[in-house]
């Protein structure tokens, strides 16, 4: 297959449900801490898994002699709307402390998601704040539920080329004649002259949106990017076993 | 091992004068003003109930069972009220699984009571008011409050509402001296609702100072001893009244076209509907039974399209996906005689009064003889009418099946009911309810539960694991805030936990959504925003964007899903793209399957003895009581199979191999789909494990097949034994969708996932997400988590039939059934339907990652070709 130019972006390295930019900015999508909160009678293993995944990624990067300098969380750090439970408070703080230990408080950027209405007090406890968007070189990070036009404006004549989003939790079901398997995936494509990346959820928030089945545009809290545009985006599945990404071409090619 | 079913003595017909002797003069006068004489059910039942004997009355529909039960009780209450001795308490509880029971209750209780009161008034006899209270899920809060103030003497309820009452203080007081419990439609409780009710009955017994007489009312069912055991629990006596039917039946099998194989679909289609229309026009009112909701829709649709002048307002569909309003509207029209024909799946099988029906058409085999009789019994509802039933067959397998089932129906052979045992999800819910009621000693609780037939052999271990789950012991120490009960190991006491316990229990109670349903809403087009009905989840899984399907006789196009709603476009002209849904297809019962196997054997012997065509056709006609054309059809089918290969039968399990695009191995195992499901998945799993690749599996009632590159059958068969099939199956299903779905249902029943919490209803979509997380979490904690164990049990025992699969493996081992392997160039005639139907599942062995890589390679190839 002719590899796309986008795909060869040397600046972007695919990781397990996350990305590394310029070998220094670690970006991860929705975590949805506390999503298990409303489940009854079983222990919460979500945080444990998130930690396991993070440790695995960081030790992999260490082996490659890569030092992460910044961490960007693309929103929906926690799951519940409206109220914070004890366990969410505890878990959020533990995770923040882990990030602080890695890169220091000032190098953590928390983007505000639609689930994060009352995350502020937790974040404040660690003297941090939530951002609607964040700019790094020519890249803008947003959650994806709402478009912040000002984020794309050129303040200092910086040209924004890339947008990174979470929110959607894309997954794709691959099918052959009789087998079906569902995978978390990344999306990337062109939108308004920019390159957009959509990251999968980092935490285990359930099945996610299946691009092959759920017409994205109908979800109330869908991505601000038009569904027709998303169909032209590329689907990338990362295989953590062999540390390789697999480009499956455009969404449209997989859903017909 | 399972305890033996107890044997019960049979009730005998009692003397008429004896019964008259016990009747209160008022009741006697009322009765004989309405009826000439006692019915058989009354001769069997009234006296025994009067003598306070537990009794199971099994009788066909229309035989006045319900009135039998109420007659004794009304007689008793009228006697008390005449003497002014009626107390403020519930004397009798009547529980029925039917929600639409009010009509029956009016006929059999409310009206008689009113008429007796009028009679008393006329005669100047003063009676105390006998109150009847009705509480179902539909009863309003105001009515409930009223009921709680003044005790009803007769309390009408459903299994779910009864369970709620058992945790309500006011009701517990009123239930403290219940004298009678009636369980109606007990034949339809061979499911988790029944299991649930069985514990409720024991709880009622525990609350009540006296032991209420248990009265079970059932349609024709087998084995009666097991149902009686289910009614009274362990270690109690009961009588069984087997009321023989006087109703004559007139059954025929019809084929729309003589040659079912060499015709094109269009001809078959037009003669099929021509035949249905002809039969309908020849009769006054017809009920057509199909086996699936989708087929119901299809039949209504086609009849309207092909005979627009015959069917306009006088045709209706009735199935469980349609709204309650729609269904009661159809029932009402039926009773008024306004409909010429109603097409239904299974929803009209049960006892609601549907007025005068003179013909029942069974489109496709009803899959069990009990169901055949039940359906045909809907025609000529009055006891002495003749029930007219016509089987219309759709293909050649259906022809054989229908012929044998009609024989069984004519000879009134009934297949066995399956009652689930030791369901840990239902148990969780009941223990929670019990803990809300009061503080229990753990042994007292355990012993009470074990009195239920469904839990008679519940192990202490399983019981304790449910207690552990409910007490939050599976959770991490700091998270047991979600525990529902507390268990004190020192004092051995159990009680509820949490302020909201009662609310959580009441709003989440119940065992149905066995399948969760998704509401269909018009999202675009005419009547935008209106709800049309529901489809089940597995149906939705198959739907793609733009698919057209039929619901309520109209066509809709799938747009998108949101949570538990699916949005569609109305006013669609295109033809449906989704023909039917597989998951709800009724499985052929094991007993009927064996009967067909024996029939095959008889025919096989005759072919081998070189009997001539006429002799064999004559034999078929006599054996299954069919007409010449049907016998010819059957003969031809068998003749082709005999000429081509061999006839598989009850003692010969043919295993046929042939090479098509892939290698195929076909098992002609005529044991019904539930058994075949278990056999094929366990064998398939063992083979797939050996070769490390996926193996395709196709299953129907008559057999199953495997397809794949490499099928090491001999090796798999060497490993599989009656002793280890359970283990193999548990492994085989561990990653399947079906286990996930069943787990979600079990988790909801066990209240792990709350549908309603703090006044918020959780959508199925969110429940799905929850159960997805839950299952992945539980898999990591313990394979023996009670609710996961229950989901596995449900798949193996209720959905599949592992018990009979073990039996079949034993037969093979003992060589009562011989495996015979043959090679063919093409699938043999008997295998054709199975192969044509295609695969239904896959034994997943290929690794996810391997699949990903393979798909990627294929994708690259495809892109390069462009």
Image (cartoon, coloured by chain):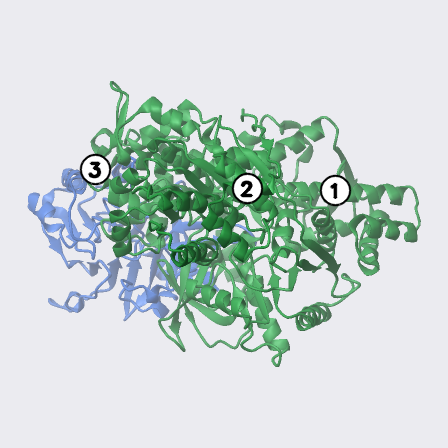
**Between disc 1 and disc 3, whose residue precedes?**
3
Asked if labels 3 and 1 touch by Cβ distance under 8 angstroms, the answer is no
Image disc number at residue B498:
3
Question: Mark 2 vs mark 1: which is more N-terminal?
Answer: 2
Front residue of B53/B582: it is B53
Tell me where residue B643 appears, x and y as whole percent. 86, 49
Which circle marks residue B597 in the picture? Answer: 1
The CA distance from mark 1 to mark 3 is 57 Å
Query: Hue of chain B?
Result: green
From mark 2 to mark 1, how far is it between C-alphas? 47 Å
Q: Which is in the foreground here, disc 2 or disc 1? A: 2
Question: Which element type, helix, strand or loop, lies under badge 2?
Answer: helix
Q: Is residue B700 visible?
A: no
User: Is B682 displayed left or right of B852 in the figure?
Assistant: right
Q: Secondary structure at mark 3?
A: loop
Q: In which quadrant is the N terminus of chain B drawn? A: top right
Identify whether B290 is placed above or below B576.
above
For the point 46% across and 41% down, the residue is B194
> Mark 2 and mark 3 in contact (Cβ < 8 Å)?
no
Residue A193 in picture, x, y percent from top left: 28, 70
Label disc, if present, on residue B629 of the rendered structure:
none
Q: Mark 2 and mark 1, same subunit?
A: yes
Most foreground residue, B405 or B481: B405
The answer for which chain carries disc 1 is B
- Residue A94 in view: yes
User: Foreground: B420 or B644?
Assistant: B420
Which numbered disc, 3 or 2, marks the residue that appears first in the sequence?
2
Image vertical order of residue B603 relative to residue B428, above or below: below
């Amino acid at each position: 297959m002719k590899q796309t130019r986008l795909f060869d972006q040397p600046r972007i390295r695919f990781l397990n449900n996350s990305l590394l930019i310029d070998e220094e900015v670690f970006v991860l999508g929705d975590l949805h801490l506390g999503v298990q909160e409303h489940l009854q009678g079983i222990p919460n293993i979500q945080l444990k898994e998130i930690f396991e995944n993070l440790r695995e990624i960081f030790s992999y990067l260490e082996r490659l002699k890569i030092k992460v300098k910044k961490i960007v969380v693309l929103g929906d750090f926690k799951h519940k709307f409206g109220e914070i439970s004890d366990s969410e408070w505890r878990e959020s703080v533990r995770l923040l402390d882990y990030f602080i230990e890695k890169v220091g408080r000032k190098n953590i950027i928390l983007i505000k998601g639609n689930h994060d209405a009352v995350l502020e007090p937790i974040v404040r406890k660690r003297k941090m704040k939530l951002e609607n968007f964040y700019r790094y070189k020519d890249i803008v990070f947003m959650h994806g539920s709402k478009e912040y036009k000002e984020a794309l404006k050129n303040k200092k004549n910086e040209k924004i080329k890339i947008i990174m989003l979470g929110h959607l939790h894309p997954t794709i079901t691959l099918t052959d004649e009789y087998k079906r398997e569902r995978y978390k995936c990344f999306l990337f494509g062109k939108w308004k002259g920019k390159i957009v990346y959509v990251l999968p959820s980092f935490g285990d928030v359930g099945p996610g949106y299946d691009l092959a089945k759920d017409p994205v545009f109908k979800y109330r809290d869908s991505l601000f990017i038009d569904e027709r545009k998303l169909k032209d985006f590329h689907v990338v599945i990362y295989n953590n076993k062999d540390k390789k990404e697999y480009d499956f071409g455009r969404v449209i090619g997989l859903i017909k | 091992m399972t305890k033996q079913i107890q044997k019960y003595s049979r009730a005998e017909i009692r003397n008429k004068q004896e019964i008259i002797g016990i009747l209160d003069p008022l009741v006697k006068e009322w009765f004989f003003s309405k009826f000439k004489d006692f019915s058989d059910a009354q001769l069997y039942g009234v006296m025994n109930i009067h003598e306070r004997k537990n009794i199971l009355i099994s009788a066909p529909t229309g035989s006045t069972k319900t009135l039998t039960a109420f007659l004794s009780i009304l007689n008793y209450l009228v006697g008390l009220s005449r003497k002014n001795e009626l107390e403020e308490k519930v004397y009798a509880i009547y529980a029925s699984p039917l929600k639409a029971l009010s009509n029956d209750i009016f006929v059999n209780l409310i009206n008689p009571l009113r008429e007796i009161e009028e009679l008393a008034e006329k005669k100047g006899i003063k009676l105390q008011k006998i109150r009847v209270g009705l509480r179902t899920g539909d009863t309003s809060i105001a009515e409930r409050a009223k009921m709680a103030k003044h005790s009803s003497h007769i309390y009408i309820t459903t299994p779910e509402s009864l369970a709620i009452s058992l945790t309500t203080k006011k009701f517990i007081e009123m239930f403290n001296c219940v004298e009678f419990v009636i369980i109606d439609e007990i034949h339809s409780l061979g499911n988790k609702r029944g299991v649930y009710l069985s514990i409720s009955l024991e709880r009622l017994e525990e609350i009540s100072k006296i032991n209420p007489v248990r009265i079970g009312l059932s349609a024709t069912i087998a084995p009666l001893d097991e149902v009686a055991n289910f009614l009274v629990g362990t270690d109690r006596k009961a009588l069984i009244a087997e009321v023989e039917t006087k109703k004559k039946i007139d059954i025929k099998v019809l084929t729309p076209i003589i040659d079912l194989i060499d015709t094109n679909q269009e001809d078959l289609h037009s003669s099929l509907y021509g035949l249905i229309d002809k039969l309908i026009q020849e009769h006054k009112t017809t009920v057509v039974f199909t086996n699936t909701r989708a087929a119901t829709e299809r039949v209504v649709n086609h009849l309207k399209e092909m005979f627009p002048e015959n069917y306009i307002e006088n045709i209706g569909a009735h199935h469980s996906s349609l709204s309650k309003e729609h269904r009661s509207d159809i029932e009402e029209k039926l009773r008024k005689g306004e409909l010429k024909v109603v097409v239904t799946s299974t929803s009209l099988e049960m006892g609601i009064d549907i007025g005068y029906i003179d013909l029942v058409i069974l489109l496709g085999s009803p899959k069990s003889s009990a169901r055949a009789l039940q359906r045909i019994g809907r025609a000529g509802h009055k006891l002495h009418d003749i029930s007219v039933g016509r089987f219309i067959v759709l293909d050649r397998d259906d022809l054989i099946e229908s012929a044998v089932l009609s024989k069984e129906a004519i000879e009134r052979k009934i297949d066995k009911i399956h009652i689930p045992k030791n369901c840990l999800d239902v148990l969780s819910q009941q223990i929670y309810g019990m803990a809300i009621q009061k503080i229990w000693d753990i042994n007292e609780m355990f012993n009470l539960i074990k009195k239920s037939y469904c839990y008679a052999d519940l192990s202490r271990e399983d019981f304790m694991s449910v207690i552990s789950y409910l007490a939050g012991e599976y959770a991490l120490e700091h998270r047991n805030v979600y525990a529902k009960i507390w268990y004190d190991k020192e004092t051995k006491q159990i009680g509820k936990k949490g302020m909201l316990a009662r609310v959580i229990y009441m709003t989440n109670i119940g065992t149905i959504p066995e399948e969760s349903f998704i509401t269909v809403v018009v999202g675009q087009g005419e009547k935008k925003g209106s709800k049309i009905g529901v489809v089940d989840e597995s149906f939705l899984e198959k739907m793609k964007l733009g698919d057209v399907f039929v619901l309520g006789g109209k066509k809709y196009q799938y747009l998108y899903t949101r949570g538990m709603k699916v949005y569609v476009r109305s006013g669609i002209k295109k033809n449906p793209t989704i023909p039917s849904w597989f998951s709800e297809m009724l499985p052929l019962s094991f007993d009927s399957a064996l009967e067909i196997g024996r029939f095959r054997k008889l025919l096989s012997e005759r072919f081998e003895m070189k009997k001539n065509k006429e002799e064999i056709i004559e034999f078929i006609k006599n054996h299954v009581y069919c007409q010449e054309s049907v016998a010819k059809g059957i003969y031809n089918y068998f003749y082709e199979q005999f000429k081509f290969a061999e006839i598989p039968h009850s003692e010969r399990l043919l295993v046929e191999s042939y090479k098509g695009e892939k290698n195929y191995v076909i098992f002609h195992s005529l044991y019904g789909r539930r058994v075949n499901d278990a056999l094929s998945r366990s064998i398939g799993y063992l083979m797939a494990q050996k070769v490390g690749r996926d193996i395709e599996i196709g299953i129907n009632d008559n057999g199953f097949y495997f397809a794949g590159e490499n099928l090491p059958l001999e090796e798999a068969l060497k490993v599989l034994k009656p002793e280890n099939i359970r283990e193999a199956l548990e492994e085989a299903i561990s990653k399947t969708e079906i286990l996930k779905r069943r787990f979600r249902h079990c988790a909801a029943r066990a209240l792990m996932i709350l549908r309603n919490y703090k006044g918020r209803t959780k959508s199925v979509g969110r429940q799905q997400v929850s159960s997805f997380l839950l299952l992945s979490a539980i898999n990591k904690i313990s394979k023996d988590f009670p609710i996961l164990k229950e989901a596995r049990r449900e798949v193996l025992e209720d959905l599949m039939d592992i018990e009979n699969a073990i039996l079949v493996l034993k037969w093979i081992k003992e060589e009562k059934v011989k495996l015979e392997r043959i090679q063919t160039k093409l699938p043999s005639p008997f295998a054709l339907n199975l192969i044509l139907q295609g695969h239904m599942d896959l034994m997943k062995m290929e690794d996810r990652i391997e699949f990903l890589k393979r798909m990627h390679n294929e994708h690259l190839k495809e892109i390069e070709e462009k």
